[in-house]
Image: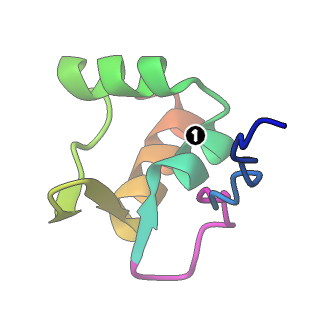
Amino acid sequence: MSTTQQHQPRTKKTYIAAPLPAEGYCRKPSILAILGISSTSFDNGIKDGRFPPGKLLTPRCRVWPVSEIRALLDSIEKGEAA
């Protein structure tokens, strides 16, 4: 009999998009769900200056103030931004 080790299934928890809160900060999956665009399109929009760049909460966690996202949604609604 061989003594191979059985691997346990991975129990990685990922961030699930949440509705936009009244105030505070939100993370990228929530913004992507609201805008209905891909992560690459959002990143390109940041580079082009169409979307706000956000702020680093930690070296690997970027967040966006809800006020900036609401302003972005208002400008999209008025046809000022694409």
Q: Is residue 1 visible?
A: yes
The residue at 18%/58% (across/down) is 55
Q: Which residue is mark 1?
A: 32
Q: Amino acid at mark 1?
A: Leu
The residue at 61%/37% (across/down) is 35
Q: For the view shown, which residue lies furthest in the front direction?
A: 1
Q: Which residues are magenta?
A: 14-24
The residue at 70%/60% (across/down) is 11
SS at circle 1: helix
Q: Quadrant of residue 37?
A: top right
Frontmost residue, 40 versus 36: 40
Position above or below: 68 against 32: below
Left or right relative to 11: residue 61: left
| Residue 71, image x, y percentages | 40, 54
Count numbered badges in the picture. 1
Frontmost residue, 69 versus 10: 10
Q: Is residue 82 visible?
A: no
Left or right relative to 8: residue 43: left
| Residue 51, image x, y percentages | 32, 35
